[in-house]
Amino acid sequence: MENIFPSPHPLVAHKLTRLRDRATDHRTFRELVRELAILLTYEATADLPLRVKTVETPLAPHVGQEMTDRIGLVPILRAGLGMVEGVWELLPAAQVWHIGLYRDEQTLKPVEYYNKLPVEPTVSLCLILDPMLATGGSASATVDILKRWGVRRIKFIGLIAAPQGIARLHSDHPEVPIHIAAIDETLNDRGYILPGLGDAGDRQFGTG
Ligand code: PRP
Ligand code: URA
């Protein structure tokens, strides 16, 4: 399958294992989510376009480069929130546009509860942030929202995906690259990723 990018980086594998561990406390869990978001964003932004920018060093002029994109970070509430701070350290000029979705526990379908996007798009590239790609319903619905907003270039950055979620997002939106720390085995009958890490929102916010 094209456009699927599991991270090959040893630091990502190491931190993800600590994140999965049920013995990891909430505070450490949040730190790891933040650090993993930075590492994955570094990989996901490797192809961003640049234009020439000339600066004066203290000694001489230098013909350098700068990014051309206006970037929007789109965390899916709640669990995507924990990824924002890390990504923002790399991309301090990025705008943050929150999308609120929760999964109906019976149908597993996403229900939208927060969306304050203005009428016209204000960014040229959106990075969707959500640790878990389970059935893929939430990520796919978020891409739909962003496409309706008028954004053409969209990437998904997550931590753990089920094969079912990758298949769904890729089939609905094949042009959206999926950057992920790991692809797990399957989903359980409640739509949780196995082995996964449990409930990413609860483990970040101490509500489990
Ligand atoms: C989780 C997760 C994703 C979604 C993934 O959110 O953060 O948004 O489930 O599942 P899907 O791929 O099957 O759609 P949840 O609905 O638990 O809401 P929360 O983050 O507010 O806890
Ligand atoms: N949401 C989570 O937080 N964890 C899963 O495994 C699936 C959806």
Image (cartoon, helix red, strand yellow):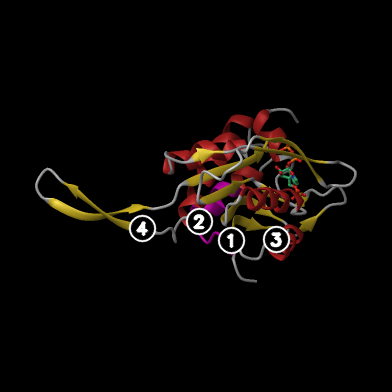
Q: Which residue is mark 3?
A: 166
> Quarter containing ligand 1?
top right
Q: Is mark 1 within 8 Å of ligand 1?
A: no
For the residues marked 4 and 2, what is the alpha-carbon distance in whole angstroms? 15 Å
Residue 50 - label? 4
Secondary structure type for disc 2: helix
Camera-side mark, 4 or 3: 4
Rendered-image quadrant of the N terminus: bottom right
Q: Left or right of 34: which side holds 171?
A: right
Residue 44 - label? 2
Up the image or down, 195 lies above or below 81; here it is below
For the residues marked 2 and 3, what is the alpha-carbon distance in whole angstroms? 16 Å
Density class for disc 4 (Cα within 10 Å; few <14, some 14-19, many ≥20) is few
Density class for disc 3 (Cα within 10 Å; few <14, some 14-19, many ≥20) is many
Residue 177 - label? 1
Quarter location, residue 207? top right
Task: Say what amino acid the circle numbered 1 marks.
Answer: Pro
Camera-side mark, 1 or 4: 4
The stretch drawn in magenta includes residue 74: no
Rendered-image quadrant of the C terminus: top right
Secondary structure type for disc 4: strand
| First-in-chain label (2 vs 3) | 2
For the residues marked 1 and 3, what is the alpha-carbon distance in whole angstroms? 10 Å
Identify the residue shown where x is 66% and y is 45%: 20
